[in-house]
Image (cartoon, grey):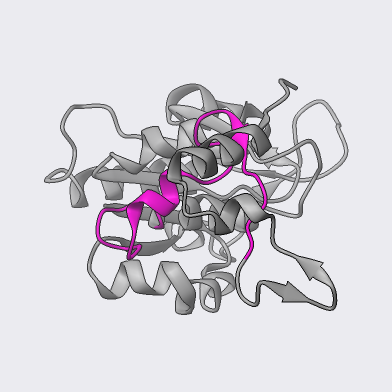
Amino acid sequence: MHIDILTLFPEMFESPLSHSIVKRAIERKKLSIEFIDFREFTKDKHKQVDDYPFGGAPGMVIKPEPLFEAVDFLKEKRKYLLGSDEFPLIYLTPQGESYTQQIAEELSHKKYLAILCGHYKDVDYRVREHLVTREISIGNYVLSGGELPAMIIIDSLARLQEGVLSNMESAYSDSFQDNTLDGPYYTRPREYRGYKVPEVLLSGNHKLIEEWQKSKRKKLQKR
């Protein structure tokens, strides 16, 4: 899987991509990521990518020019990965659909994705109308930009790539995987400070253990 990140701050990704599961996915060539600083695509001599919105609203808005130019560049560069004329561009915005494990599952099977990290007040709406193919939100709160949400999506997709986790069954038994929240887990020692592991987990009876585990999983409440 290859992901292009359109961002004004590529350096923000250095540490998250250098550790743990994401690092392993990259090293095993299950995931590749490239950063496109769309400031490089503006024709403004001062490299300015934002401007005041028409209508006098407060805040600054990213201009359409650098993003249209950047997407044109990527369409040509990645045409060998694109199965159709549609360029799959995800925009991270509070107005988008809530990100879920089901969406992560769906996206994890794609060969290619592009993610747009917004900044300032918003991007010019023509970008959303004519370039963006999907809008996603990671929660009902406001962040300074789309970089942190992009990191979350990258992490969730990396661990679902075949050959990244040592045991894929672990991924498919996690919370949200079947619309439930995972139950409790215990490890050695059997007793610690007087607190004991439930006897059923020590019984060796796999049927009883499976029933106990299912009984402890909580149905995810719809929001």
* Residue 49 in sight here: no
Q: How many marks?
A: 0
- Is 49 placed above or below 71 here? below
Residue 113: quarter of image: top left
| Position of residue 87 measured from the top left corner of the image (x, y, whole percent) | 30, 34
The residue nearer to you, when weighing 183 against 144, is: 183
Residue at 40% from the left image edge and 74% from the top image edge: 23
* Residue 128 in sight here: yes
Q: Quadrant of the C terminus?
A: top right
- Is 43 placed above or below 86 here? below
Q: Is residue 166 magenta?
A: yes
The residue nearer to you, when weighing 207 against 53, is: 207
Start and end of the magenta stretch?
159-186
Residue at 54% from the left image edge and 54% from the top image edge: 203
| Position of residue 20 measured from the top left corner of the image (x, y, whole percent) | 47, 74
| Position of residue 174 measured from the top left corner of the image (x, y, whole percent) | 52, 46
| Position of residue 47 measured from the top left corner of the image (x, y, whole percent) | 56, 64
Left or right relative to 17: residue 112? left
Residue 72: quarter of image: top left
